[in-house]
Amino acid sequence: MTKTLNHRACHLCEAICGLTIETTASDSAGLQITSIKGDPLDSFSRGHICPKAVALQDIQNDPDRLRQPMQRVGNEWQAIGWDEAFALVAERLATIQERHGQNAVAVYQGNPSVHNYGLMTHSNYFLGLLKSRNRFSATSVDQLPHHLTSHLMYGHGLLLPIPDIDHTDFMLILGGNPLASNGSIMTVPDVEKRLKAIQARGGKVVVVDPRRSETAAMADQHIFVRPGGDAALLFGVLNTLFSEGLSRDSHLPVDGLDQVRQAIAPFNAEAMSPLCAVPAEQIRQLARDFAAAPTAVCYGRMGVSTQAFGTLCHWLVQLINLVTGNLDRVGGALCTEPAVDLVASTSGGHFNLWQSRVSGRPEYAGELPVSALAEEMLTGGEGQIRALITVAGNPVLSTPNGRQLEQALDGLEFMVSIDLYINETTRYADLILPSTSALENDHYDTTFNMFAVRNVSRFNRAILPKPAGALHDWEIFVGLAKAFAARTGKELKPTLPPAQMIDFALRAGRYGDASQYKLSVTRLFDHPHGVDLGPLKANLGPRLKTANQHVQAAPAAILADLQRFAALQAPAADELVMIGRRHVRSNNSWMHNYHRLVKGKPRHQLLMHPDDLAQRGLSDGQRVRVSSRVGEIEVEVLGSLEMMRGVVSLPHGWGHARPGVQMGIATAQPGASANDLTDERQLDELSGNAALNGVPVTVAAA
Ligand SMILES: Nc1nc2c(c(=O)[nH]1)N[C@H]1C(S)=C(S)[C@@H](COP(=O)(O)OP(=O)(O)OC[C@H]3O[C@@H](n4cnc5c(=O)[nH]c(N)nc54)[C@H](O)[C@@H]3O)O[C@H]1N2
Ligand SMILES: Nc1nc2c(c(=O)[nH]1)N[C@H]1C(S)=C(S)[C@@H](COP(=O)(O)OP(=O)(O)OC[C@H]3O[C@@H](n4cnc5c(=O)[nH]c(N)nc54)[C@H](O)[C@@H]3O)O[C@H]1N2
Ligand code: SF4
Ligand SMILES: [Mo]
């Protein structure tokens, strides 16, 4: 038996923790993973690890994980060869496009796409050939308002200021629960220690959340907010900063601040208080505390982007940082300087150049809001979607009104999924093309190094050999591209493997050949624990990509949305709305098939305030029926003082009890899908992002 210690960044969530993975080679069992631990020598994650990383071995060994292309013949799945599969996809897609036009083929790309560098470098090699305007992704059930705000204010959708958590004196968190999620658009392994360090140096952490989340529970102050009321709260804060003379000049060139000041003059704390259910004096005090802190950062995440005013929220977050002098400042919000820099190498993007056919939803960066996906399939006429390609995504469980989407998928002429499992979505596919597992593949994090609270870089080799006959995700795309080009006579440019692309990008980047670091893939091999490239610094001025290189404080599209906000009403006395919840042992919809993560008591119940239970004559632990405009589910309800009155919380990603799902452990503890209740018509209308939080529901005994 030979043991080897391998070092590698975890790709499962945004924290990119360094891991030490021990493999053991033996004659009897071949090469096996024998232990997974946090890597104490990783200067960024300092040994931090969460339970999900240990499940990497379960993903590897899962008998339900597909290892070869599968074709559905009636209700049966049959293995099929790669070349045959590629040719079939090319033939079916080409025929559908010839008959019904390019837009008849749609694409949905899911979350693991951004955690897998081969998908980042190569999915467009094939998907770009389709020239379809019907491109969708998980972005529009998540962080689209972040990108749109940065695009409009800073000229590039990826120029996202990151909280300088290690140096700030005051961190205001809205709609993020990093203790469960391990941080998002803030790559921050070991977040609990870093939040405690703020407190230890005399600083303050304030959390705004309709639930007393794990993060709220450790904060110095927790403010309950009505779901979807954050824009009102933030307007009240910004208005107070202006009206009480608490604002400071920024060193950045800024256009439009006077316009902002005027536009928000009516939105004072007193007027905003009933809309967010936060007392006016508390709003004003929050503004005063924020402005008085030596450095401060306002950070809004998932909970405030997936709501009706998601873009207004993120715009206000930026403005609050800006007018208190905390944008582009140590201890405030800073943009990263990654080794592979997509901001430097890509254009700023575009918005609303075209709209979806049925509901007129705007495109952003070539993608349409996924809330429009089902209706584009179900509504007949020219431009109707007839075929779908899903890539590392499970939209039946992750996008609003999953039941409607199921109906739409059932009516497609053709569907192909590049995925590891036969799950709630891929069971509708005609073909599933599974890639190698992550540990059989090299890894460079092109995405999350870009959002990290320190500039870091690492390249890790595959830990396990590539099984005979298996293909990496990027190779699947190359195979599809070649077959499609051959079938359609389209021109195909040559491509390189992802590692070579990263090598070029590293060497041409700011830490490359022209720098003291001389980063390249080979050089990073010598640093298996990663390379620390230093803390974030002020850099936004020269990086701005707006036309005049000024920050645009008052983008016209955003100001126009104030009218929609003006119609927001205070909650009715009996309002009951649903929000989401994450747990550290879960990861969106796809990690419920590993015993180690789902054992113990279930974690997918509906949480409700005991008074709300009593009002409905319900009791703790009872089965209830939860209904919304679009559907209903049955779940167990738990009384919880964590919840704000009038708000219930249900995690998403469950609901595995659907026919044909081939994930034995997940289906044994299925839960119910929150997205059988979320409403595809409830949107942040400006960006088209789904409003998954603040969904009106009723709850009654089942
Ligand atoms: N109600 C509600 N809905 C939500 C959310 C919420 O908070 N509340 N959160 C939203 C958010 S933030 C997101 S990001 C989305 C996620 O939504 P999706 O991205 O649609 O869903 P995931 O659950 O991440 O599904 C990932 C899929 O990728 C496959 N997969 C995993 N690794 C790989 C790989 O390396 N290669 C390939 N080819 N496939 C792989 C898995 O088998 C699975 O099918 O859900 C959103 N939906
Ligand atoms: N363990 C685990 N980690 C994950 C994931 C996972 O599924 N599981 N998913 C990953 C992904 S894809 C993402 S995008 C990130 C997301 O990471 P986060 O943005 O930290 O998301 P959540 O943990 O869902 O926390 C959102 C918080 O918003 C609150 N909230 C809901 N509605 C509102 C509202 O209207 N206003 C306010 N102020 N708060 C509200 C919720 O109660 C919750 O506490 O996590 C990533 N990390
Ligand atoms: S926190 Fe995220 S990156 Fe770190 S070990 Fe857990 S899943 Fe992996
Ligand atoms: Mo996400």
Image (cartoon, rainbow, N blue to C red):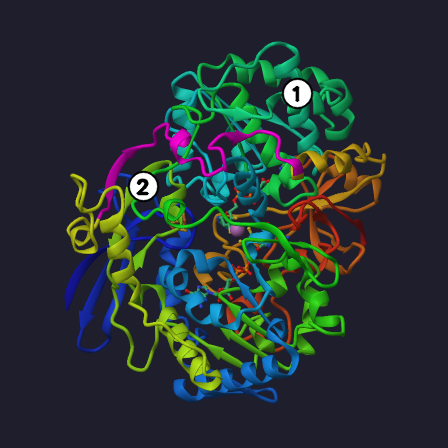
x, y percentage for residue 629? Answer: 81, 55
C-beta proximity under 8 Å, tags 2 and 1: no
Q: In the shown orientation, is residue 67 left or right of residue 351? A: left
Residue at screen point 27% across, 64% down: 33
Magenta stretch contains residue 374:
no
Q: In the shown orientation, is residue 25 left or right of residue 341? A: left
Q: Is residue 419 visible?
A: no
Q: Nearer the viewer, residue 247 or 558?
A: 558
Q: Read off the residue under disc 2.
A: 45
Q: Pointer 1: residues within 10 angstroms few (<14), some, or many (20+)?
A: some
Q: In the shown orientation, is residue 385 left or right of residue 574? A: left
x, y percentage for residue 338? Answer: 33, 43
Q: Amino acid at mark 2?
A: Ser
Q: Read off the residue under disc 1.
A: 261
Does residue 334 sit above or below 2 in this rendering?
A: above
The numbered mark, 2 or 1, whose residue comes first in the sequence reads 2
Residue at screen point 59% across, 37% down: 175
Residue at screen point 83% across, 45% down: 617
Does residue 107 sit above or below 183 in this rendering?
A: below
Magenta stretch contains residue 550:
yes
x, y percentage for residue 695? Answer: 74, 47
x, y percentage for residue 568? Answer: 79, 35
In the picture as drawn, the residue positioned furthest to the top comes out as: 245
Residue at screen point 32% across, 82% down: 469
Q: Nearer the viewer, residue 197 or 670?
A: 197
Q: Which span of residues is magenta-colored?
A: 529-556
Determine if the C-beta at disc 2 is less than 8 A from ligand 3.
yes
Q: Amino acid at mark 1?
A: Arg
Q: Quadrant of the N terminus?
A: bottom left
Assign a secondary structure to mark 1: helix
